[in-house]
Image (spheres, helix red, strand yellow):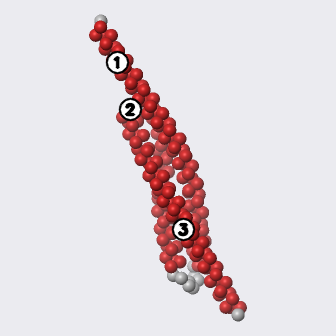
Amino acid sequence: MKNILMILAVIAIGFTACEDQNKNLSEEFDKLQKESDSISEAHSALKAQHEQYKVDHSAISQQIAGQELEDSTWLEDLARHEVILQNHEAQMAKHEEFLKGHQELKNTFSTLTAEQMEEQISMMRDNHDAIKNDHDTMRKDHDQIRDELESIRENVNNAVEVDAEETDG
């Protein structure tokens, strides 16, 4: 009888430990889901900013198309911006897939084993870190592109004004 009680006690402790572990993992997952939501909002804002830089880039490219350029580095800068913006688009698409996967995981997380939960949580952390790092890099790239586009725009406008004055004079 004592053996049966001991066995039942061990089983009860085992179930309690598993339930505690699953509860802790679920709480950790909920925290990561909130972080994922926050990252998703930041991602949307960065994507909107990215789209604006694409428009600005296109407008300046069209403005200088066919003009005699005083500085050939403008075209080099615009070509470099084009590559950076395309790279950002690929990164953002990858981020959107990660975030979509995080949302889909929400529906099935409670059905996973503890080991699977731990693996998914670890992957989410890694994804979050990668997205945050990429976002930081994109923000820096956007700042540089903005500054260079403003400089090109200023120089093009100044060149147009000088040409107009020479034509009038």
Packing grade of label 1 (10 A; few <14, some 14-19, many >=20) is few
Determine the residue positioned at 55% across, 46% down: 38
Left or right: 47 as drawn, with respect to 114? right
User: Residues under labels 1 and 2: Cα distance?
Assistant: 17 Å
- Counting residues from the start of the chain, the first of labels 1 and 3 encountered is 1
Which residue lies under the disc numbered 2? 114
**Spatial CA span between label 2 and label 3:** 46 Å
Q: Mark 2 or mark 3: which comes first in sequence?
A: 2
Q: Position of residue 127 (x, y in %)?
A: 44, 48
The residue that appears at 50% across and 79% down in the rendered structure is 73
Q: Secondary structure at mark 1?
A: helix
Q: Dot 2, crowdedness within 10 Å: few (<14), some or many (≥20)?
A: some
Q: From this view, report whether residue 153 is shown above or below residue 47.
A: below
Residue drawn at 68 percent across, 91 percent down: 167
Q: Residue at x 47, y 37 (%)?
A: 29
Residue carrying label 1: 11
Q: Position of residue 120 (x, y in %)?
A: 41, 40
Q: Residue furthest top?
A: 1
Structural crowding at the residue carrying mark 3, measured as other residues with C-alpha within 10 Å and reported as few (<14), some (14–19) or many (≥20): many
Residue named by callout 3:
145
Q: Amino acid at mark 2?
A: Ala
Residue lying furthest right in this view? 168
**Mark 1: amino acid:** Ile
